[in-house]
Image (cartoon, grey):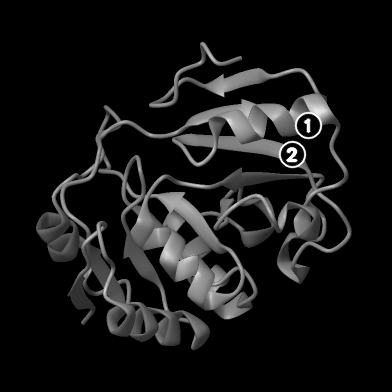
Amino acid sequence: MARFIRLYEENPDPKKVVEVVSVLKKGGLIIYPTDTVYGLGCDITNTKALEKIARIKGVKLSKANWSFVCADLSNLSDYVRQIDTATFKILKRALPGPYTFVLPGNNNLPKDFKKKKTVGIRVPNNAIVISLVKALGNPIVSTSIHDEDDVLEYTTDPELIFEKWQNLVDIVIDGGYGDNVASTIVDLSDGEPLILREGKGSIDIF
């Protein structure tokens, strides 16, 4: 059964952060808060953990389109081909924030993503997940959790999330009530912004 760990966004407890990161490093799965909906994730360098998420989501790992949660834009060049100034200005303006940006991937992507031509990058405006990424030392995978309903409904109550997911993951982080609107997805892989999904992030900044 998963552990249920309470973290406060104003000041995430470093000891609890270390506890979560140690689970990630061992290939564990976590559910965590973002600035939009709660996410399901793992260490992007751990193949077994990625395969577990793929099974849960009912997709092949090679076909999965998950985003990378980064702490900031400083490590962008680790995963993304060189981008032009205009594209970087858009990223600087929007992040951290409720956006996922699709960018051209480079040859340094983790082995399970090597065949991907693009990668989704997230820098959420949420201190809990950012502190986890910083302590881990590399991004974590982000895929949203939602109810299996005809209408896409996101669970916002961490206690209800725990009830549903406790036997599928290792840790559920209670970071307070989540949002029920996902991130805005913007494709910048060809330079010009293309809105793939309108979500919480305003499209007026483009």
Residue at x 33% of width, y 63% of height: 31
Give 130 or 63, whichever is nearer the viewer: 130
Taking 143 as reference, is 110 left or right? right
Tell me which corner region of the image, top left, top right, bottom left or bottom right, holds residue 206. top right
Residue at x 43% of width, y 87% of height: 22
Tell me which corner region of the image, top left, top right, bottom left or bottom right, holds residue 188. top right
Where residue 13 appears, as percent x and y from the top left, is 26, 75
Q: Marks 1/2: CA distance?
A: 4 Å
Given the image, on which type of amino acid does mark 2 rest?
Leu
Give 174 or 61, whichever is nearer the viewer: 174
Where residue 52 appears, as percent x and y from the top left, is 48, 71
Taking 97 as reference, is 109 left or right? right
Tell me which corner region of the image, top left, top right, bottom left or bottom right, holds residue 10. bottom left
Given the image, on which type of amino acid does mark 1 rest?
Ser
Q: Which mark is drawn over residue 198?
A: none
| Label 2 environment density (alpha carbons within 10 Å; few <14, some 14–19, many ≥20) | many
Q: Is there CB contact under 8 Å for labels 1 and 2?
A: yes
Taking 44 as reference, is 17 left or right? left
Q: Which mark is drawn over residue 189?
A: 1
**Residue occupied by mark 2:** 103
Against 40, residue 17 (above or below) is below
Residue at x 58% of width, y 49% of height: 67
